[in-house]
Image (cartoon, rainbow, N blue to C red):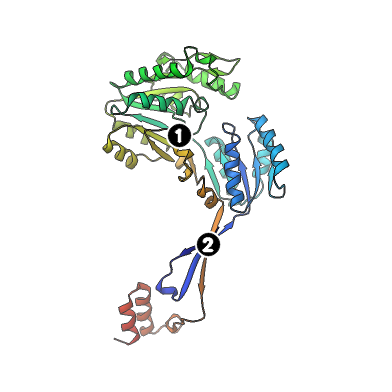
Amino acid sequence: MTPEKAKTSLITFPSSAELVSEPLGVILVISTWNYPFVLSFEAVIGAIAAGNTVVLKPSEIAPATSSLLSKLIGEYMDSSAVKVVEGAVPETTALLEQKWDKIIYTGSEKVGRIVAAAAAKHLTPVILELGGKCPVIVDTKANLEVTARRLILGKWGSNSGQTCVSPDYILTTKEFAPKLVDALVRELKKFYGKEPLESPDLSRIINSSHFNRLTKLMDDEKVSGKIVHGGQRDKTTLKIAPTILLDVPEDSLIMNEEIFGPLFPIITVDKIEDSFNVINAREKPLAAYLFTNDEMLKGEFVESVSAGGLSINETTLHSATLTLPFGGVGESGMGSYHGKYSFDAFSHKKPVLRRSFAGEVAARYPPYTPEKQRFLKAFLDGNIIDVFRALFGW
């Protein structure tokens, strides 16, 4: 919170400058259901740290957590600084009709557009943490066993794929794809056993609506024959087994919406470098991943792929690194937060210039004679020699 010193120039000499962080005011946090506790408090803590007051709207899709947040915040926090508003669409709509100093929303692109449109009426700035189809490139020069384990953890180990930065689809070469599938299947059996639907370590789908959406993606006639592992489902427990699909067509349903579930399609390319074209032909994702030991490919990946964040030889962990900002780009969102970036996100960096009454320059004021203009030009250019020449009429 300490003011940050800023450099000044010859134009303002003698002077000093600083950036003073001030709170924006009242922040609206609209949280999501897949990590309903941590994603609520990460934003709330950042907003409070910056000196704001906060209204938190938890997700109604996770009603137990919403109720608990309301209870605990009401019990342990200052209700004049932090309030919780529970409810569904009508309550969220009513909140969005109010004027806020900033809104942070985590969720789908569809609702993100509604939030942005409502905020625009009041010229309210927004942070939108959305999602998209996060790609994974797996090169032939990757450590296959480690790659498989980290892909499983990032996909099925992260709420069965119900995570905004969860890998959405894999890109690899035609020759390497069978080896990758075999490695994934081997490690999946180690993690979740031969009957994954019975595993206590496999997350269920959040509700029947999302379960039906995911089964529709699996049962699409363009991909139903492409399942090479998994596909089992249990509607009573809302569980879907880890499912791998190979060579799915790009015009299928599963490749035209964010999966947000335990289905993992693989697209094959002739050369691994062709993966960049596949990714860049789509909207910018929230995250993109590469597994390789090829240093040149790593460099090309960083230069060629635009995403909210990148990880090389890992999945999702960049979003848990508080020294890095977390946010989207393009369709995957705008603005960022986490750690110190949360403080910055909910602050206005107010520039302050300080001068004394000394240092008056007559040339600043009319009438602007040719001599004054010559002096001012040299002064604005920052050329000390020309300034002295102008002063002495040289």
Q: Position of residue 288 (x, y in %)?
A: 40, 35
Query: Where is residue 147 drawn, in percent x and y?
Result: 37, 27
**In the image, what residue occupies the spot 56% across and 51% down?**
346
Q: Is residue 349 left or right of residue 9?
A: right
Is residue 282 visible to us here? no
The image shows residue 319, relative to residue 9, as above or below, that is: above
Identify the residue at the far top of this view: 194
Q: Amino acid at mark 1?
A: Thr
Secondary structure of the residue carrying numbered label 2: loop
Q: Residue at x 43, y 66 (%)?
A: 7
Residue 175 position (above or below residue 393): above
Does residue 125 appear in the picture of this structure?
Answer: yes
Query: Looking at the image, which is closer to me, 136 or 270?
Result: 136
Circle 2 crowding by C-alpha within 10 Å: few under 14, some 14–19, many from 20 = some
Q: Relative to residue 198, is residue 250 depicted above or below?
A: below
Residue that badge 1 annotates = 316
Q: Position of residue 361 (x, y in %)?
A: 44, 82
Mark 1 residue element: loop
Distance from the alpha carbon under mark 1 to that under mark 2: 34 Å
The amino acid type of the residue labelled 2 equals Pro
- Residue under label 2, please give it: 3
Residue 249 in the image: state x and y as whole percent.
38, 22
Relative side of 366 to 312, left or right: right
